[in-house]
Amino acid sequence: MKKAVLISLSLVISFAVFGQQKIKIKEGLKDCRVIERVYTNHSSNGQLPKPFPASVPSGDRAVVLRQLGTSANGFGMLGVRQNLWADPAINAVSFIHRMHIPPHGPGSGFLAYDLSLNGGETWTNNIQVYEAPSADFNGRYPQGGIYNPLGNTDPDNAYQAYFAAVLDGSNNGTWGGYGYGVHKFSGTEPPTQHNVAATPEFLQGVPEAYTITSKGLAMCADPSNNGVGQPFADFFIITKGYFNPEIGDFEMDRFTEYMPAGGVSPISGTAVGVADAKVAFSPDGEIGYISYLSNNGENTVESEGCYHPILYKTFDGGDSWDGPYNVQLGGASGLPVVLEYLTDELIEILFEPPYPDREDIPFTSAFDHGLTVDFNGNPHLIFSVGIGSQEWSIYTSHAGVEGCGGMVAMIHAFSTDKGETWYGKLLTLLKTFRGEFPMAGSDPSSEDNRPYLASTPDGTKLFFSWIDTDIEDYGENDQPDIYCVGYDAINNTYSEVYNVSQFTAAWYSSYMATGSKYALDMGDGTYKVPFAFQQIDPLDLGNPVQYWFVDNFILTDADLSVIQGTNELEAFNFSVSQNYPNPCKGYTFIDVITKTKAAVSVEISNLIGQTVWKMPVKFYNEGKHQLRLDIPELKKGVYLCNVQVDGKRISKKLIIN
């Protein structure tokens, strides 16, 4: 594997240019660029690493490690993709991966999944779903998830879906193919497999964006390039289709959508590509977003030569897309969380006098991110941000410190109006940024902080995760732990930062950790947040790997109420009580307090966002009002009670027994 120079040491003073003003950046700053991997077919006959103990005490969280399947090498987990998926309706968790070479498996181009039907406690591993009869069918970098038909509670009726890049050489080199299909959990039907080659219209690469909606729509979004590592062609290839129960498979089709970049460095004149892409839909499957880290030249001058999130939005299942919706990181209209995270002392360390105003500093995102959509159909992002060189790189360290030294922040950025307006919250200042992992006969491979974003299926609770190495006087992110923060999207409150790996066998060795699409809502105010990682040979990533599931990391509603969220959100002019009694049966009450005369309506929705009961709009004067909700038709279960007053909504969890 060859890669471009990833980290450079500035030997002369650098200049960031804004109109007539020049900002002088001091010597000795390290900067990192997008990891440009030239993927190989490297396979090893080395031995699997000795397995960890399956259960290790881990403080008050009682986290345990569960053994998953294996693979021929560690390449399949490089990059931030959707390998892990949980479905609380059937208490299932699945993990998609490449397979091992003979005699331990059929070959590294074959794909398999590992499956648990009891929330991750026990597993059936290496269930093959994709076959590679020859080298040009070899599957790589798989993604996948669980398709569970609406209302189903029998795991035998659910399916594992997968989507992978294929080494068929159809796009100007080694890559170009897609391979996708499903496998029914009951095992009564063989896996389906579809192979689709690139064409001049569909310049397919190595996708990083995949999801399955509650309406049974599977979708992959892939930036179009004339070969891996080539310039972005300003189109996304969207491959999507609904599940057809008559054939037991997704009926997929593909088309291109114009979603341009176009940003150019003001220093070197080089054009930008797409560093990362994601796709996600609201709990009801109605509103979807594609997000990607790039630059379309539409933000302010401080953003030139820097990456930022760009989003497109759909209301019709991805048939049409509206955008772009840009996240402005710096400048006068930048996110306050970005403008404020650098200390005054650090600004003086990093820049030559006269020291720049914060609004003049060029901020950039890094090169990976996570995306989800909440109960109101609004997008949430996690990504790291730092000072940009304006030549498509991010400064990650300065002279005299090991690691980032406060230069790089992991943030939560979100919208409350479908992408028009953006807010942000600091999750943490990263200790380290990039880690390098050796492999025989080639340059090392690199991984950054790998941000992931999970949610409960109803989109009310979010869980941010990333990897970082926190060792005193150590600056490389090559001995990482998993970190997690929970968020209550209804109440706008966060948990503390938790080190998930601490006191387990994965402490300082949670390599290439991946997060689930969904968390398991236990129904009692607790949430199990799934993770997986690979156990590698730290001296050679090309040797076989053992995958592990991180079980029993649980956060509670109380945990998610410790830290108040951003105070930039517009204050509500009303309040809503929890319904009472709760749990209830047949009827319940809520109290609504309005500060002015207001229009009030109530909707009750299930956990996938479908409205199951409505109270039409009624007008109330200022004051406290008791509303009786007569709901005898609603069955036992957990619902959301959504109270809307003058266009603003507050949601509460409602339980029927």
Image (tube, rainbow, N blue to C red):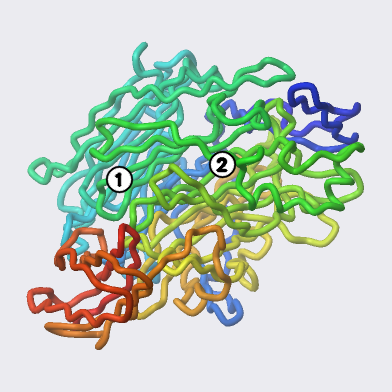
Quadrant of the snapshot with the C terminus: bottom left
Quadrant of the snapshot with the N terminus: top right
Vertical order, 14 against 158 (above or below): above
From the viewer's perspective, is the residue at label 2 or at label 1 nearer? 1
Left or right of 416: which side holds 328? right
Regarding mark 2 in the picture, which secondary structure is present there? strand
Residue at horizontal 25%, vertical 74%?
638
Vertical order, 583 against 274 (above or below): below
Q: Residue 368, labelled with which disc?
A: 2
Residue at horizontal 18%, vertical 68%?
618
Which kind of residue does numbered mark 2 sit on?
Answer: Asp
Pick the front one: 655 or 123 = 655
Q: Spatial distance from mark 2 to mark 1, Cα to Cα?
A: 23 Å
Question: CB under 8 Å between callouts 2 and 1?
Answer: no
Give the image location of residue 379, x and y in percent.
42, 49
Which kind of residue does numbered mark 1 sit on?
Answer: Ile
Give the image location of residue 337, x and y in percent.
64, 52
Residue 13, image quadrant: top right
Number of residues whose C-alpha sits closer than 10 Å to that of mark 1, classed few (under 14), some (14–19) or many (20 or more): many
